Amino acid sequence: MATSTETPTQASARDRLLAAAEALVYAGGIHATGVDAIVKQSGTARKSFYTHFESKDALVAAALERRHERWMNWFIEGTLRHGKTPRAHLLGMFDVLREWFAAKEFHGCAFLNASGEIAAADDPIRVVAREHKEHLLAFVREQCDDYVAATGIDGRRAAPLARQWLILIDGAIGVALVSGEPDTALDARAAAEQLLNAEETHTHAPSRRSLT
C-alpha cells in the first residue's frame, strides 16, 4: 500500500497496477486474470506488485474501490443533468445507463460480476461489491425521498420504491450484458415510469369514504 514516504515513481506503479487490474478483470473476470498479465499490462516490475499488495485478491479489491468512486461520480453527475425534478432524475438514470450500455467497453456491472466469482460473503472483494450497491441504493433513496416530498406520496413509500428502482437498474444491466441491446435501458425506463404513475395514481385517487 502507498504511504506518505513513497516516491512518485512508486505511487505511479501502484496506480498503474490498479488500472491494469481493473481493466483486465472487468473484461475477462477475476479467475481468468493472472498476476503476470496485470504486471505486464501495467508496465511495472513484478516486485512492484508485492511491494503494494499482499495478494491478487487485495489488488482486485482495491481496483474495485477505485472503480466504485469513478462509477458513482459518473452516475450521479449524469443523473442530475437529466431534468430539474426528482421524477426526471429518477427516470434519467436509465438514459445514463443506456449511454453506458452502448459503449464498446461495456461488460456489465463489475461488482455483480465479481460477486458471481467469489463465494464467501466476507471476502474483501464481496465486501467492496456489497458496499457499492449500498452506496448506489443510498443515492437512489435520496432521489426517492425528494420524489415523495414533491408529489405528496406517503413518505414510507420511499424505501421500497428505492429498492425496486435498484432491481430495475441491476436487471437492466444484466439483460443488456447478455443481449447486447442498449435499448434494454429504455425498457427498464418504461417499467419505471409505470411504477411512478401507479404510485401517483394511488396517492391522488379519491378514497372510498369520500365517495360515499
Image (cartoon, grey):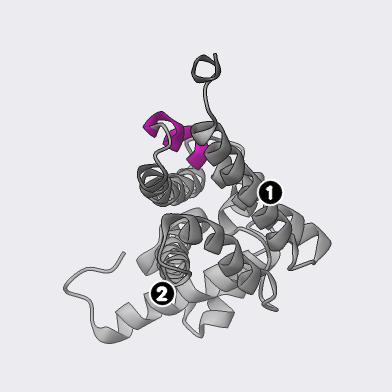
Q: Which residues are magenta?
A: 155-162
Q: Amino acid at mark 2?
A: Ser
Q: Where 181 falls versus 195 (above or below)?
A: below
Left/right placement of residue 99 relative to residue 145 reads right
Q: Quadrant of residue 97?
A: bottom right
**What secondary structure predominates along the stretch shown in magenta?**
helix
- Quarter of the image where the C terminus is located: top right
Residue named by callout 1: 191
Residue at x-position 75% and y-position 66%: 183
Residue at far left of view: 5
Residue closer to the observer: 1 or 71: 71
Left/right placement of residue 194 relative to residue 212 reads right
Q: Residues within 10 Å of mark 2 (few under 14, many from 20)?
A: some
Q: Is residue 35 visible?
A: no
Q: Where 93 falls versus 78 (above or below)?
A: above
- Quarter of the image where the N terminus is located: bottom left
Could you say where residue 108 lies in the image, as x and y percent from the top left? Answer: 66, 61
Q: Is residue 160 magenta?
A: yes
Q: Amino acid at mark 1?
A: Ala
Q: Where 108 falls versus 134 (above or below)?
A: below
Could you say where residue 89 lies in the image, as x and y percent from the top left? Answer: 47, 60
Residue at x-position 45% and y-position 50%: 140
Sequence order check, earlier mark of 1 and 2: 2
Q: Residues within 10 Å of mark 1 (few under 14, many from 20)?
A: some
Left/right placement of residue 131 relative to residue 200 reads left
Q: Which mark is residue 96?
A: none
